[in-house]
Amino acid sequence: MSHRVIFLTPHRFALNLFKRMYLGLCQLEYKPIYIVPRYHMYRKLVQESKDAILITKKTERIAFNVNQTIEFACGAMSAQDASDFMAACYQALPSSCASDIIVNFNGNTMMGEVVRLYASENKVKTLFIEIGNFPGKLFADPLGCNASARLFSAHERILASLEYDMSAFQSWKKHYLGGCSAGKKVPQAEALRSSYLERKRYQLYDRYGRLFMGAVKTHRSTVRIRLPIKASGFLTYTPLPERFYIMPLQVADDTQLLIHARMTNLQAVQIAHHHATSAGAPLIVTPHPADMESEHFKHVAQYCHDNQIILSAHPTFTCLQKAEHVITINSTVGLQAQLLGKPVTYLGKSFFPLLERDTSIAKYIQHYLLDIDPFSTEPIAIHQLQRLLTRAETSST
């Protein structure tokens, strides 16, 4: 196995996804290597006889720009801790080979910045992966995800090269929007749920790794019980007015807000309130079902209370169907609104407004997104894995 696929793996969800590629990669004669920052992840990989490297503390310092990392932006890491982690991560990477592919989840992370520097210095291929915008889909791009993706900077060239089947797209759209109307659960919301005891157990393993294995510090070590925002009692089932603007909130510490928009949910609501008021329409705000940070939500709730903004407990899609205008930072809800034919205002960076017509959306869904379910537990099929690997490129390509 002369070809290697090196996975820089930030968390358990990414590890579970990357491990699903193991059997297929071996059959394609690639050698998978997993580089992980937490001992509980390393321990599991060793038990499964997979090649694993635990990122350990290093004394050598390397200068990194931490400002574009989500960990620093959300306050989970200080600038010094983030820089130390990135140096350790960089030094954990094995000596490069021209045929290597380095895979990372999301890309706007400490690990993602390390991947970019390492790849530019060693001319190896990179691949950044994220949960797709639609069920059963995976996003993969050689430069990054969201507004960091090559799709954002070169959408015309990329979309022009893709085919589409409008009949199949219209059938898919009808089925997808029907599922949204039925109120299907958001998979991210389910995936984020873990018990206090489970998190504590992983934390104890990681503490052992830091004390006895030299594992690097990855984040603040406090364990908080986070309540779903619906439990906070801020939401209301007030009947929807005849006409209104809607502003769906996004996950408070998400890359889309902190890196690609540089604004908070509260700031976005204030801007949306101005837009709605200028149009003479009331504003409805809806929470993100995967946002568990109720402390952030309190500030939004107080602003809504002070300004007669409806903080709705109705499903976001129900509100979306009846809204006159949709305002979003850069959420997939904006793309849903486009599918419904609604006017949309984007406040942050996103390639969604670049998908101006149904033909562009059809190309994106049918051929740019990959038919790999991020939430499955089954091994990824060989033909899908081959498609995924063709997305890997060097940054100069």
Image: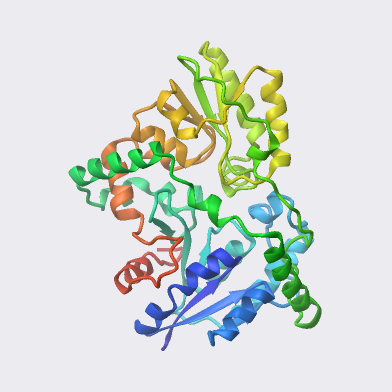
From this viewpoint, is residue 197 visible? yes
Q: Position of residue 190 (x, y in %)?
A: 54, 53
Residue most toward the top? Answer: 280
Residue most toward the right? Answer: 211
Q: Residue at x 43, y 53 (%)?
A: 132
Q: Position of residue 363 (x, y in %)?
A: 28, 48
From this viewpoint, is residue 116 visible? no
The image quadrant where one finds the C terminus is bottom left
* Residue 278 vs residue 173, the one in the foreground: 173
Quick check: 318 above or below 62? above
Q: Position of residue 131 (x, y in %)?
A: 47, 55
Instruction: Report whether 179 appears left or right of 268.
Output: left
Q: Residue at x 46, y 37 (%)?
A: 333
Q: Position of residue 303 (x, y in %)?
A: 70, 25
Instruction: Report whether 72 appears left or right of 238.
Output: right
* Residue 97 vs residue 336, the one in the foreground: 336
Q: Residue at x 57, y 81 (%)?
A: 45
The image quadrant where one finds the N terminus is bottom left
Quick check: 382 above or below 187? below
Colour scheme of the rendered structure: rainbow
Instruction: Report whether 38 appears left or right of 390.
Output: right
* Residue 306 vs residue 367, the one in the foreground: 306
* Residue 192 vs residue 389, the one in the foreground: 192
Q: How many marks?
A: 0
Q: Name which quarter of the figure residue 242 lies in.
A: top left
